Each structure stands twice: as C-alpha cells, then as structure tokens.
Amino acid sequence: MTDRRVMNLLYALLVLVAFNLGLTIYFQATKPQPVADLSANPGGAAAQISDKEAMALAHSVVDLYNANDTHGLYLKFDDLARLQLTEQSLGEKLAKLQSMIGRVQDFAYSNAEVAGKSGGRTFLTLNYKARLTGGTFSSGAIRLTVAMKDGHASLFGFFINGQAD
C-alpha cells in the first residue's frame, strides 16, 4: 500500500514538473524581447549621441553629484525616471555613495551601447572612465542610462563604481 502512495505521489510530481516546464516555455516564447536593431542604424549607439553631447550630459550630472546638489540632480532625471524614485531616496543613496566613492575628479567618455527600445525611445548606456578622490577608490567607472527621443537625451540612470587599482 505504501508503494502505491509513493507511485501516485511520483506521478503527481511529474505532472506538476511537466506543467511548470510548459508554462515556462510558453511565457518565455511570448515575452517581448528588447532588440537592439543596429542594422537600421549602421553607426550603432554612437551615431545616436555625439561625443560632445555625452560629455556635456556627464559634466552636468557629475557637477551636481560633486556639489552634493540632490535637488538639482533629481530634476536632471527624466519625468518617467522621477516617478521611480523620490528626491529623499535619491539623497539617501547619494550620501552612501559619496561616503564610499568620494568625488569625481576627472572623467573621459568611453563608449555608448544600445540598452533597448521601448515606447518610441531608444535607451543607451553611456560609459565613462573616472578618477576619484576622497573615498576608498582612486579610479572607477561612470554609467549614465539615457533615453533618446527625437534626438534629445534624457537621464534615466546614474551609476558610479569604484575599481581597485
């Protein structure tokens, strides 16, 4: 009698596993994938934003970060991005970041990558190398996530990472 219960339980588990596998395959097949269609834009992400624009945007963001101007940095974010965070939470995150990273002394634009497309916007990740002072690290990387719409970049994300020398 115990063997029969074990077999019934084993069959029930196999049915659940098969059902779970089927659902996983279905949802993965129907999930929209962000596609970076670089064939329509032969220059790739770099053609969507100039080096000058990328540096100007980074200068404004880094200047606000170094000045500890939470309000100004918050206003620099796109309207959609501001709906994702409050000015208070941004201030708390910046305080933690500045205590560990310190200030950005200097930086240079490295490259841009297409992060995806959504709602008529092309999202780019702009990468920079940075020299840091006043914190744990002396060098690092800055990443700005921007949305390009009608040829204009708007800030969606701001990341600074320290790198061990």
Image (cartoon, helix red, strand yellow):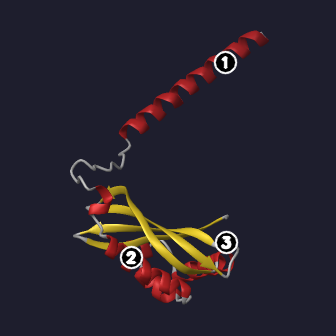
Tell me the distance, in whole angstroms, between the alpha carbons under discs 1 and 3.
55 Å
Quadrant in which residue 161 is drawn: bottom right
Q: Earlier in the sequence, mark 2 or mark 1?
A: 1
SS class of the residue under badge 1?
A: helix
Q: Earlier in the sequence, mark 1 or mark 3?
A: 1
User: Could you tell me which residue is drawn at 49 percent across and 88 percent down?
Assistant: 71
Front residue (pair 91, 133)? 133
Bin the neighbour count of mark 1 within 10 Å (Cα to Cα): few under 14, some 14-19, many 20 and up: few
Q: Residue furthest right?
A: 2
Q: Is residue 121 in view from this perspective?
A: no
- In the rendered image, the vertical position of residue 28 relative to residue 162, given as above or below: above
Bin the neighbour count of mark 2 within 10 Å (Cα to Cα): few under 14, some 14-19, many 20 and up: some
| Residue 50 position in % (x across, y down) | 30, 70
SS class of the residue under badge 2?
A: helix
Which quadrant holds the C terminus? bottom right
| Residue 123 position in % (x across, y down) | 35, 62
Tell me the distance, in whole angstroms, between the alpha carbons under discs 2 and 1.
61 Å
Bin the neighbour count of mark 3 within 10 Å (Cα to Cα): few under 14, some 14-19, many 20 and up: some
Q: Which mark identifies residue 10?
A: 1
Q: Earlier in the sequence, mark 3 or mark 2?
A: 2
Q: Which mark identifies residue 137?
A: 3
Front residue (pair 119, 165)? 165
- In the rendered image, the vertical position of residue 36 relative to residue 72, given as above or below: above
SS class of the residue under badge 3?
A: loop
Amino acid carrying label 2: it is: Met
Tell me the distance, in whole angstroms, between the alpha carbons under discs 3 and 2.
22 Å
Q: Which mark identifies residue 55?
A: 2
| Residue 68 position in % (x across, y down) | 56, 88
Q: Is residue 141 left or right of residue 138?
A: left
User: Could you tell me which residue is drawn at 27 percent across and 64 percent down?
Assistant: 48
| Residue 75 position in % (x across, y down) | 42, 84
Amino acid carrying label 1: it is: Leu
